[in-house]
Amino acid sequence: MTADRNRCWRVARHSHPGEPFSAELFDWCEEAISEPADGEFLVRTICLAPGPAQRGYLDKGKERLLERVAVGDVMRGRGVGQIVASRHPEYSEGDIFLGSLGWQDYSVQRPRGKEFVFSTKKITRPILPLSTQLGVLGQAGVTAYFGLLEVGALKQGDRVLVTAGAGGVGSVAGQLAGINGADITAGTASTDEKCAWMCDELGYDAAINYRTESVDERLAELFPHGIDLIFDSVGGEILDTALTHLAFHARVVICGFIATDYTIDPLSGPINYRHLLYKRARMEGFVSFDYWDRYAEAEQALAGWYRDGRLFNSEDVDQGLEKMPDAVASLFTGGNRGVKICRVAPDPDRLPSE
Amino acid sequence: MTADRNRCWRVARHSHPGEPFSAELFDWCEEAISEPADGEFLVRTICLAPGPAQRGYLDKGKERLLERVAVGDVMRGRGVGQIVASRHPEYSEGDIFLGSLGWQDYSVQRPRGKEFVFSTKKITRPILPLSTQLGVLGQAGVTAYFGLLEVGALKQGDRVLVTAGAGGVGSVAGQLAGINGADITAGTASTDEKCAWMCDELGYDAAINYRTESVDERLAELFPHGIDLIFDSVGGEILDTALTHLAFHARVVICGFIATDYTIDPLSGPINYRHLLYKRARMEGFVSFDYWDRYAEAEQALAGWYRDGRLFNSEDVDQGLEKMPDAVASLFTGGNRGVKICRVAPDPDRLPSE
């Protein structure tokens, strides 16, 4: 072990409706490191994955995918780490481990099955940097993969729009569209700098700055024959505008709704959902965990594209466990460019051999 | 021929946004009957099908499935009639003919292919009353059939909600759900009398009067495990409420949006579309004409259920061509109970033998 204390973020209180996510919801603690019991092992956190869903872990709204985290508990969060002590026969010191490590340096873990989100995994052939296991080769990549290829049924020649095209999942979805034969891939983002990055690094054919450009006009110009597939993580006005540009038999994949997810103003739904009828189109929501049984397929494909140099590691790394609350908050203000990662410790010098 | 004049409704003007449909938009005319040229035939209208889409034929909005009807033209409308004179070798006097007859007693017709909506057909084995060819065995039935079984992918044991459950298409969709193995079928309607009719004649397990009952509470009570399939022709608040009761992997079939179709107030979309993600559900629009190539399949199935006495002829007949404008208007105020039909002439005594 490299430190004798466990730094962690514990939940100080739940958030009020509409309250921005911030460090005020947490207490920073430094505590003794727990000891693994029989069948358990101790994991040192290397990277954590800040995600928009984490805001939901603290809010008082009634709709969420996961239970709230109780006040006083260490904040929930997926991460990748290395086993530093083990009392489980199949897990050894040095193994790379993926699981719900929480916002802390050290956690006692045990293997878990495919229960929703709490699933764990030993990574037998880790690719460096390990952050990719949480990003383009991990949750973000797998979500983009199933959303685009399975729910969206992307086919050769499709004209694709990715909203939040420079976001965590979007930055991978845009790349996967191009890799898998989309005729044109366009994305929306909040700054010119992100738009340039999308075209220069991620292979987008076009990017729309929704803060300074008319999304409606740009879509009309980029998609004169309509959009075949919308990969949407945003909702709100951008989705509503995009729905008026659907091609016949279009697919609209609902991956999230970060634009309105925590608004307390009276919400408006996608008024233009009626274009689903005009264009005989479908809108479908999904959650990547539902594809748990097929994660290996996605991970293998993603790793292949990454090794070939076709999939760019579109990650956006914050350094230090103390950054976690701000890292999550930044997701709601367009502060990230790619998959947000929080690096808690350096990658190990020595990786386990299989 | 049984009369020497052709009575017809000609378009007097187009409607203003939000203007209710009414006879004021038309001129009632009595004119000479046209003569068929070579390759044409003259059809006497027996029944017409008033439909909500007809309002769109006159309005100035930009979104519609069909072109507007020009001012001065006879109003467009599908109907069933009998050929009274023919100069086409394959069509004989006495044949029963389905096509775009228009709001008039007599029309000159010729066969047309599968062009959208203007398709025509000779009915070789007509079932009486001929109104069924426009209703439960015709467009309404076929729409319910493909919407429910194909787009909605109804399967044995599904829990089904039909909005506008006593409406033209809804009154058939509700019946087809039961016939095809739905575990529970519930519908919404605007009066207690319609609700009773749905349960007594159409085989609904339950009906909700959305004007006097809490749709939310009734759905919670009727669908404790969620709704697997929503067949929606309404949109608006009812759809939005129903979306919060989806079961996992639910299908929401968008057949129309009569609640808001002609509203000029700022529209609200289905705010609760986010439940599509929570429940991994899909919402899909369709237009029955897209299934043109498979109409025979649907018609055969519908006719079979009708002959077996399992499909009730849920039609709502107005008598007389002069009733057409009011018949269409009634569709927007919940004035119909079942498939609205306008009978222009009695069924013929003698049907053609094949």
Image (cartoon, coloured by chain):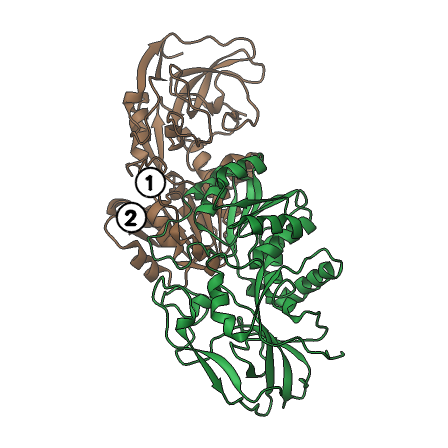
Chain colours: A green, B brown
**Residue matched to label 1:** B266
Q: Residue B215: where, in percent of width, then height?
A: 30, 54
> In the picture shown, does residue B38 fall above or below A161?
above
Given the image, what chain letter belongs to the residue carrying mark 2?
Answer: B
Q: Name the residue located 55 percent from the left edge and 72 percent from the top edge.
A: A78
Give the camera-side residue of B317 and B99: B99
Give the camera-side residue of B270 and B176: B270
Q: CA distance from mark 2 to mark 1?
A: 30 Å
Q: Residues within 10 Å of mark 1 (few under 14, many from 20)?
A: few
Q: Residue B187: where, in percent of width, then height?
A: 35, 50
- The amino acid sitting under disc 2 is Cys
Q: Is residue A223 visible?
A: no
Q: Name the residue located 34 percent from the left edge and 57 percent from the top edge.
A: A264
Quadrant where the C terminus of chain B sits is top right
Disc 2, SS: helix
Q: Residue A160: where, in percent of width, then height?
A: 60, 45
Instruction: Judge from the rendering whether residue B264 lies leftward or rightward of residue A325; answer left or right.
Output: left
Do tag 2 and tag 1 residues touch (Cβ < 8 Å)? no
Q: Residue A10: where, in percent of width, then height?
A: 44, 79
Given the image, what chain letter belongs to the residue carrying mark 1?
Answer: B
- The amino acid sitting under disc 1 is Pro
Disc 1, SS: loop
Give the camera-side residue of A327 and B69: A327
Q: Is residue B280 visible?
A: yes
Quadrant where the N terminus of chain B sits is top left
Instruction: Judge from the rendering whether residue B83 lies leftward or rightward of residue A93; answer left or right.
Output: left
**Residue matched to label 2:** B195
